[in-house]
Image (tube, rainbow, N blue to C red):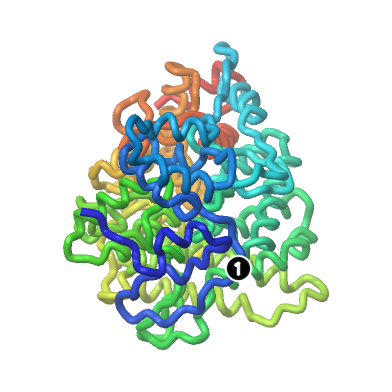
Amino acid sequence: MHHAAPPCCSPLLGLSLTLLMATCESVPAHAETPREPVTALLPQTPDLAYPALFQAVQRQQLFDDQKYFVDALPLRDPALIEADYLAQREQPGFDLRRFVAANFKESPAVDTGTLRQDTGLREHIAALWPKLVRSQVEVPPHSSLLPLPHPYVVPGGRFREVYYWDSYFTMLGLVDSGEQAHSRQMLDNFAHLIDTYGHIPNGNRSYYLSRSQPPFFSYMVELQAGIEGDATYRRYLPQLRKEYAYWMAGAASLLPGQAARHVVKLDDGSVLNRYWDERDTPRQEGWLHDVRTAMEARDRPAGEVYRDLRAGAESGWDYSSRWLRDREQLSTIRTTALVPIDLNSLLHHLETVLAQACRQPEAGCDIDYAAAAQQRKAALDRHLWNRAGYFADYDWTTRTLSDQLSAAALYPLFAGIASDVQAQRTAESVRAHLLRPGGIATTALRTGQQWDEPNGWAPLQWIAVEGLRRYREDALARTIGTRFLGRVQGVFAREHKLVEKYDLDAGASGGGGGEYALQDGFGWTNGVTLKLLDLYAPATPKRQAEAISP
């Protein structure tokens, strides 16, 4: 069974020059307010540029990874390719694979090449950085890539483009490696994306433009301010304000119990945020996965499932039992029904940085961002603090607080929102339920989703370590940091590489689960590893190995 798109999302739109994303939204669930249509001229996405061919390639699984085809470069006008496909597909002897090979150029995975096998972690990462750098000031016609004015560092493997939240942790490593110029270029690229598209997309691909990712831009600005001083806040104030406007769009017109795009107004008038995507169609880079998931959700409109899958991708936790009504079934995903603790902690930081930037001479701000930050903190205390001893996600549609503890509970510590008592109780909960031989678990459930047990992810280790250290929970921070370093070192010693995620229970093993194979590189692991080595491992190789053994 195939779930057809709404009439406004007809494949005929693939021949148009613009993508009006909001016109493809299904009738919203719960008390959603009407949304203004998006009218910006945006690059075409592959699913609309050659819709019949796109669906045929993805449905027949021509490639092992569904991202492969949307990254491939059309060699001529997509409308002509689509027309030729429609004309030829029923002819005797038509070969779809041969047709694609004749009309598209592959975009190869990031190849880190051959590196010396006798180096330590620091030296290996230093040699990796140049291999992960890309420059795309101009892009070929019809490419799904979005141009950027400066060189940028990609994660590695199948991830051939820059990613929003990954990049903060990568930038930490670049600065640690003395690559401050590259870090500044990354920041300026993100400022360019905000100026060009009104927000930072998931990644610099046309098919990522309908959503963002966890908003770390204010942390990137703060990182740069640590290098260049407070003038940095003034320099990026216009982009900080646009970033905030993107996440808060629609808030002013909401009534209690309503939601629009990324904002939710609770019954008491508190305004908080959720993850959201402007489109309610299958993700282009995971099209068949999403179609199959929607087919399993027999009691829900397909468009609702697609939007929740896309919102889950915006969260960065794609996917986790956090988002599932039935913790075991992806088809019960309900991301847009949740007010997440991590997202709102990050937006509190954005409000705090905006308040600081607005104190600069002649800033001319017309919003009291400090007051907004205080209001958000109060709302988090009222609605997202679980008296069992941790912060959790709030379901605004059922008015219930989740009883699931996840690594996201440490974001309020990282952002400095928690009280001392809340931080102490969170540390106790994490120590009792999430601490593993290889670091901190994402959740305590083993579901087969990659953001669940037993995988450990570098960014969450750093959030935990920094958050715990901020509240003087140094012993637990050290335990998490050194255990994760032990995992990184174990895989590095055996395979001489750093990977996207790690199995926290199975010794020297990379993580598993999810929609694609384990990827090498790897940007955020490189950055977090360097920062943890600074904290917990002496500089000499011999003592370093001793310090990071599990």
Depicted 11 relative to depicted 258: above or below: above
Depicted 272 relative to depicted 458: above or below: below
Q: Residue at image x 66%, y 36%?
A: 134
Q: Residue at image x 59%, y 72%?
A: 245
Q: Residue at image x 76%, y 41%?
A: 181
> What residue is shown with label 1?
40
Nearer to us in this view, 447 or 393: 447
Q: Where is residue 229 in the image (x, y as percent from the top left)?
A: 78, 55
Q: Residue at image x 59%, y 42%?
A: 76
Q: Position of residue 90 (x, y in %)?
A: 33, 41
Depicted 208 relative to depicted 530: above or below: below
Q: Which residue is most to the right?
A: 361
Depicted 370 relative to depicted 80: above or below: below
What residue type is disc 1 on?
Ala
Examine the image and state in which quarter residue 120 appears: top right
Nearer to us in this view, 204 or 128: 204
Q: Where is residue 479 in the image (x, y as percent from the top left)?
A: 42, 38
Examine the image and state in which quarter residue 240 appears: bottom right
Q: Quadrant of the C terminus?
A: top left
Nearer to us in this view, 83 or 404: 83
Q: Where is residue 534 in the image (x, y as percent from the top left)?
A: 60, 34
Q: Quick check: can you spot residue 472?
A: no
Q: Is 173 displayed left or right of 468 in the figure?
A: right
Nearer to us in this view, 339 or 67: 67
Q: Is 333 displayed left or right of 422 in the figure?
A: left
